[in-house]
Amino acid sequence: MPLEEECRSLDAADPLAAVVAQFAPGEPGVLYFDANSIGAMPLGAERAMARLGDQWRRLRRRGWTDADWLEAPARLGGKLAPVVGAEPGSVIVCDSTSVNLHKLVWMGLEMNSGRNVVLSEKGTFPTDLYVAENAARARGASLRLVASPEEIEKSLKGDVALLLLSHTDYRSAYRHDLATLTRMAHDRGVLVLWDLSHSAGAVETALAAGQADFAVGCGYKYLCGGPGSPAWLYVAPRHQAAAQPAIAGWMGHAEPMAFDASYRAAPGVKRHLAGTPPVSGNALMEAALDLWADIEPRAAFEKHARLGDLLIRTVQELTPQSGLQLASPREAARRGGFVAFRHARAAQLADSLNAVGVVVSHRKPDILRFGLSPLYHRYLDVWELGVRLKGRTT
């Protein structure tokens, strides 16, 4: 079957086809393969903002209670939990990824206080490393880096308190085996913190099944929460009673409106809230998370794997002389949310593709990233990418 016809057949049989229609179209004729940078806008986002505007106009201060603005972080966490494979009551939507990383690095060092090293790898997203190094220094600990995933096991020594890893490498899309590495760390008395920013909403993360201790992630990539949307954090239920918050803010107090002079931590994951929740950001994020109410996460993850496999095949079949070399794992189970290729002139090629209506991202020195969403990308979009790619590479 010709590739174009195959893509049309896949779209016709796609169980998520109705979800694709729940997203606002971008600029006419433009293909957006930048899900790894910012996701598409759900149609429900405009309705959510109109609803919030009406609440603000009518309720003002009463919106905190009458519109449940204060309950949004926990409510959204409950909606996100099935997407990341987390237990009920273990996820809270709040703050930024960096702030949440600081909280959890600090907490991991405190809970494993007999050790004084945070272990990570050089491929971890740089912000994570900055946060970890600073938080470790503040607690009299240090950050230790390994050069590659293969070195992690032998580096899990007795002084390591916390292993911090990006679940998906932001350059190659290499995806760690969360369950295996977590088990390996636990066997050596090490806690594990996962950054799922390039995974959540695209591929399976299975936090509960993998026995993860902590996790963080952003909301604006594959979760489609909008520019600057709130991030989220996860604390395994077995740790929640012992996990004292790194930032003791009033929203994490057992009774925020009691205005006690001393702090008493709220039960469960809510204790990791700090300041006033961003109501407008939460409204947009909730519009995106509501799309998952009728989606079986596994169906989305399976579609994402097929899209990635198709993209690799399309590039190789339609542009065999393109100079593009696959940088991501070929096996879908080892890939995160995007597919990466190497090209000698990656930046110039990204600009060239943009000129013909294909938006991709690049990372120095030679990486092109094609971000895929199972919620709004069609298989035919991948075919059209291949058509436009022809003649743009040498």
Image: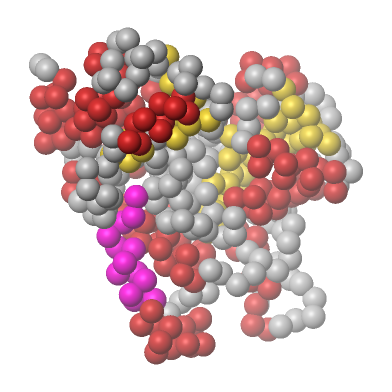
Q: Is residue 375 left or right of residue 182?
A: left
Picture residue at 33% right of the left edge, 75% below the top: 50
Residue 235: % across, % down: 61, 50
| Residue 243 higher or lower than 57, as above or below | above
Picture residue at 52% right of the left edge, 42% below the top: 197
- Residue sitting at the far right: 140
Magenta residues (range): 40-52
As rendered, which of 342 and 331 lies closer to the eye?
342
As rendered, which of 14 and 382 lies closer to the eye?
382
- Residue sitting at the far top: 321
As rendered, which of 60 and 314 lies closer to the eye?
314
| Magenta stretch contains residue 162 | no
| Residue 344 higher or lower than 225, as above or below | above
| Residue 204 higher or lower than 27, as above or below | above
Quarter of the image with the N terminus is top left
Q: Quadrant of residue 3?
A: top left
Residue 386: % across, % down: 25, 24
Q: Is residue 239 left or right of residue 288?
A: right
| Magenta stretch contains residue 44 | yes
As rendered, which of 391 and 47 lies closer to the eye?
391
Residue 89: % across, % down: 52, 57
| Residue 70 higher or lower than 364, as above or below | below
Picture residue at 48% right of the left edge, 52% below the top: 219
Picture residue at 78% right of the left edge, 47% below the top: 135
The answer to whether residue 132 of the structure is visible from this angle is yes
The answer to whether residue 191 of the structure is visible from this angle is no
Residue 4: % across, % down: 14, 24
Quarter of the image with the C terminus is top left
Instruction: Report the magenta stretch's main SS.
Output: helix
